[in-house]
Image (tube, rainbow, N blue to C red):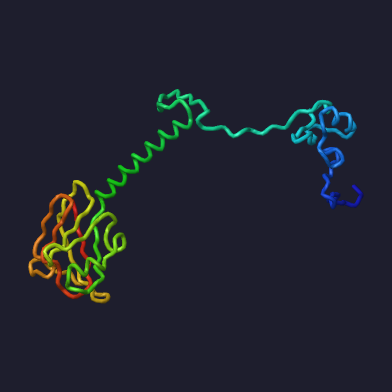
Amino acid sequence: MIGIPIDIGFKSTTGRPIQEAYLNNNVPWASEAEALAGIDIGLRHKFMPLIIVDQLYWFKADCTTLEPVTFPATVKAEDVTLADLAGIFDAENVEDALAEVMGFANALYIIIQDLLKLKQNPYTINFTSSSGSVATRISAAIETTDYPTGWTLEVDDTYNLLVTHNLTGRKIVDIKVFEINGSAERMLSFDRGTAYTGVVGNGLTVLIEGFAPNPLPMRVELIFN
């Protein structure tokens, strides 16, 4: 084959469409009749687009008939009937079925969160203040950052730390207290009274009596059943 390959293309510099029949002298056609009368049959082809008033049309295969180009309309989920052959949903349309699925998902999320709570141990309380005062330690502690969200810390009778948690149905089984001295951590002991002098568990509260008077930052680890 002998010849010189060339690329042929068109670029509009006027803003007018390359295919003039798309519009009638750069304005929409007024009617189908006007378009059929004004566009030579030899210029037509299947799916050739043109604008009539404000609607997009194209030629059908016979090139003598026009039809509007339609696009799928947005359908509301509530208007779509649900054919639930397996009998899974009570809903009769997609919108209500989605609401049922979301309800199941939310219920499952709550169950999973409860299971995670049952497995989590220990729960940590960090006291960054080096004060030997329980009240001062509590005032410097920040919820979520230094102790779990939803818990409250209170001073009880000057030297006792009252912890109110949200672990329904779980009981305290052990407490460990560490004093933090730079990078060194020393576990304080109950029997010597350096960590605390007693623990009282009552429902959603844990009372730590005689809590760590040592003038260093502390970390308390609470272990529940």
Between 129 and 8, the residue placed more toward the observer is 129
Query: Which residue is drawn at the image coordinates 19% and 61% (left, top)?
Result: 154
Q: Residue furthest right?
A: 2
Quick check: 20 above or below 32?
A: below
In the picture, residue 144 is in which quadrant? bottom left
In the picture, residue 55 is in which quadrant? top right
Q: How many marks?
A: 0
Between 130 and 178, the residue placed more toward the observer is 130
| Image coords of residue 57 (percent x, y) | 76, 32
Between 29 and 167, the residue placed more toward the observer is 29
Query: Which residue is drawn at the image coordinates 31% and 47% (left, top)?
Result: 113
Q: Left of 12 or right of it: where is 132?
A: left
Query: Which residue is drawn at the image coordinates 23% and 76% (left, top)?
Result: 181
Quick check: 44 above or below 154?
A: above
| Image coords of residue 87 (percent x, y) | 41, 24
| Image coords of residue 147 (percent x, y) | 26, 61
| Image coords of residue 163 (percent x, y) | 19, 58
Q: Left of 169 or right of it: where is 109?
A: right
